[in-house]
Amino acid sequence: MDKVFELDHPLVQHHLTHLRNRETPPHVFREQVRRLAVLLAAEVTRDLPLKEQIVDTPLEQMTGAVLAGRIGLVPILRAGLGMTDALLDLLPTAEVWHLGFYRNEETLQPVEYYQKFSSNPPDLVFVLDPMLATGGSAAAGIEMVKTWGAKEIRMLSIIAAPEGIAHVREKHPDVTITVCGIDRELNDAAYILPGLGDAGDRIFNTLN
């Protein structure tokens, strides 16, 4: 599928299996989300633009390369926060902005409750949400980032349902979607199958 990428890596499969396991405790679940987010970040940053920079090593001067342009991270609250630190490890100068949505359990539609953007958008924005289920929150969040004025937007998720991918592709065919795994389908309650349950509850230990 154009602009949709599913990671094909043994480490992704290994960590994703542990993430799905219902017996995985919250602190391990958070670690697995972080590891998978690092693998996603390594993939989606492989084509970032560079600019030359002269540095002095302990032995001589050389011309190296550093990232060019401003990069923004937009985690969709709350589950997207579980991916943020992993990307900041690799992109420590990235800006972090936030969008908050909750799902209306009757209509299954996203409801915005928080937005924090500046007046000057970054050149490239990574939208972060571990679960791309119906795609409602992702599509709405991407639309808000476009209105903000970002030049390029990329969506990162741990797992996705075909329905969610199709919805985002319909609304935003220009946005690249990169995921660790594409699952079978959504159930009647719009949960991904086989999935991993509610990512936000498992990250923040709020299942009870």
Image (cartoon, helix red, strand yellow):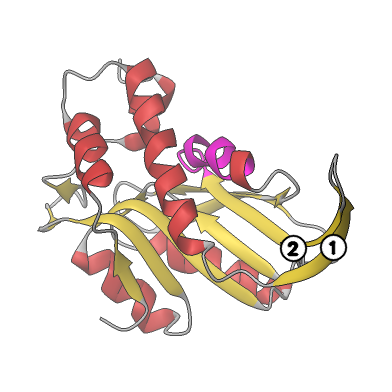
Q: Is residue 196 visible?
A: no
Q: Which is more N-terminal, label 1 or label 2?
A: 1
In the image: residue 186, left or right of residue 123 = left
Quarter of the image where one finds residue 31? top left
In the image: residue 56, left or right of residue 38 = right
As for residue 63 lying within the magenta part, the answer is no
Q: Is residue 5 visible?
A: yes
Q: Are marks 2 and 1 in contact (CB under 8 Å)?
A: yes
Q: x and y percent of residue 74 in the render?
A: 61, 53
Which residue is the site of mark 1?
Answer: 53
As for residue 80 lying within the magenta part, the answer is yes
On residue 136, the disc is none
Q: x and y percent of residue 13 in the render?
A: 20, 44
In the image: residue 61, left or right of residue 113 = right
Which residue is the site of mark 2?
Answer: 65
Q: x and y percent of residue 33 in the render?
A: 38, 35
Q: x and y percent of residue 94 in the render?
A: 71, 51
What is the crowding at mark 1: few (fewer than 14 residues within 10 Å), some, or many (at least 20)? few
Name above or below for residue 177 compared with residue 104.
below
In the image: residue 104, left or right of residue 38 = left
Tally of numbered discs: 2
> What amino acid type is highlighted by mark number 1?
Gln
Name above or below for residue 62 compared with residue 114.
below
Name above or below for residue 27 compared with residue 140.
above
Front residue of this view, candidates 123 and 200: 123
SS of the residue under disc 1: strand
> What amino acid type is highlighted by mark number 2?
Ala
Q: Which residues are magenta?
A: 77-88
